[in-house]
Image (tube, rainbow, N blue to C red):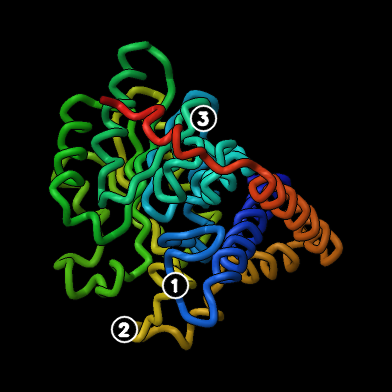
Amino acid sequence: MTSLDRLAMYTEMVRIRQYETRIMQEYHADKTPAWDIGAGLIPGEMHLSAGQEPAAVGVCAHLKKGDAVTATHRPHHFALAHGVDMNAMTAEIYGRTTGLCKGKGGHMHLFDPENHFSCSGIIAQGYPVACGQAMAMKRRGTDNVAVAVTGEGAANQGAFHEALNLAAVWNLPVVFVIEDNDWAISVPRGESTANTSNADRAAGYGIPGVRVENNDVEAVFEAAGAAVDRARAGEGPSLLEIHTLRLLGHFEGDAQAYRSDLETVDERDPIPRYAASLMESGDLTEAQAEEVKAAADAEVDAAIQFAIESPLPQPEDALDDVFA
């Protein structure tokens, strides 16, 4: 890994974080003094990925045009890392016609055919979809891969096991990713999952399984690189579990009274930790860090302005783009 690789990953992590920070501010801006989840310019639920940037950046650093990503209900970090246009994604979150789905999907239903990105609010839904994408890639004779992302809570779903089994039987070019942030909504993994590592479950399907600890973007990069290379070479699927961190609540407005680890969350934030490491190694300076943040802020400001200035869907368009 070169200094340029490290700086690029740091830059993308900061870009994602600044985006999530502004979306959080915009989301909360008009929901007070009484909390009303349906009020404001961004109504409905909001699931932010702050703290989980290393998973998306480390994996997507290996992807290219034609590769596919299916993400979870907490999708923004993977969307941005996979090249989804920030303006179009922001407009979708604001429910505007210039959005990815013309404002009709919202933040949990982002679909970008150009970049082969999708996500869903249904737990483990993306795993079988990725198998279908990978089967198409294989039949076309390309070296593209599909990446399927879910959380550790979804590893107990039937779709998870069915997808791993099918991908192994058909030797599909899939990289299955589990983001283990310790909490399945409000349930700690120890109260829902008997094994200590979901990566161990890969052995039951005859495929490699690797668990990456410490929310380390460089360790994710190395593990993901091996899995993606294996898939491109026609050697079949892999399972990658990343122990990451949810800095915020399950959704915005979540009081998190159930969390026993809140006192240590800030000190485990991966971005300042990575910045300190890069500065120590000479791969990043204070001036560069300020430039990275300023560039990210400018891009995010422009995306939010684009969304706010875009038109809302009209009532007569409600049934357009709906499958009968």
| Front tag of 1 and 2 | 1
The residue located at (32%, 26%) in the rendering is 134
Query: Of residues 187 and 305, which is closer to you in this image?
Result: 305
Front residue (pair 321, 165): 321
Q: Quadrant of the N terminus?
A: top right
Asked whether disc 3 touches disc 2, contact meaning CB atoms under 8 Å apart, the reply is no
Q: Earlier in the sequence, mark 3 or mark 2?
A: 3
207 w.r.t. 77: above or below: above
Dot 1 and dot 2 residues touching (CB under 8 Å): no
The three-letter code of the residue at mark 2 reads: Tyr
Mark 1–mark 2 distance (CA, rounded to whole Å): 22 Å
Counting residues from the start of the chain, the first of labels 1 and 2 encountered is 1
Residue at coordinates 38% horizontally, 81% vertically from top-left? 256
* Residue at far front of view: 316
Q: Residues within 10 Å of mark 2 (few under 14, many from 20)?
A: few
> In which quadrant is the C terminus drawn?
top left
Q: Residue 10's spot in the image, x, y percent?
A: 66, 55
Gap in angstroms between the C-alphas marked 3 and 1 = 34 Å
